[in-house]
Amino acid sequence: MRFKSFLLVAGIIALLTACGSKEFTVSGESEHWLADVNVSQTNDGYETQELLLTYTGDDMESVGEFNYNVDSVGSFGKSGNELEGDGTFVDKNEANPTNAKVTEQTDFEVTIEWDGKTETIQLNQQ
């Protein structure tokens, strides 16, 4: 009986936590790239920002290793990245409750450097 009560309470807590989560996406494009940042925030203050980059240029082989930086409330980036075979790249940034959080109105700017080129993308809510 205690186990059933525990499962019921755990289920209710999980349901309430899921109901209180907030998600939104910001997107943009440049001459050679598409960028999306999917933001997921939970009631307990945690936040995940998932970056999806897609190369839209003609010569994917020329990209090689690339660097990116996402400039927002909390910036993140990485060097030495490589595209998947379909021309995409995915990365995540996680923030704990003590970090500043983004909103739908937060400005996002993604800068990508590859093969001696640089493009900057302004992202807007979709």
Image: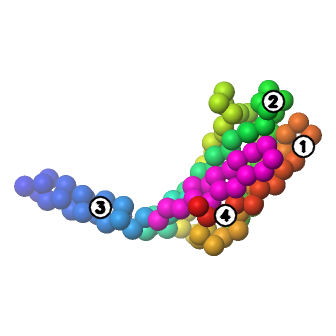
In terms of secondary structure, where does tag 2 sit?
A: loop
CB under 8 Å between discs 3 and 1 = no
Mark 4, residues whose alpha carbon is within 10 Å: few (<14), some, or many (≥20)?
some
Query: Quadrant of the rendered structure where residue 116 is?
Result: top right
Name the residue carrying label 3.
15
Between the residue at mark 1 and the residue at mark 4, the CA separation in whole angstroms equals 23 Å
Res. 51 visible in picture: yes
Q: CA distance from mark 2 to mark 1?
A: 13 Å
**Number of numbered discs visible in the structure rendering:** 4
Give the residue pinned by disc 2.
Answer: 59
Residue at image mark 1: 117
Image vertical order of residue 90 relative to residue 86, above or below:
below
Q: Is residue 77 above or below residue 105?
A: above
- Please give left or right for residue 51 compared with residue 19 in the image: right
**Front position among marks 4 and 3:** 4
Residue type indicated by callout 4: Asn
Between disc 1 and disc 4, the foreground one is 4
Left or right: residue 77 versus residue 4 is right
Assess whether mark 3 and mark 4 are in contact (beta carbons under 8 angstroms): no
Q: Which-is-in-front pick, marks 2 and 1? A: 2
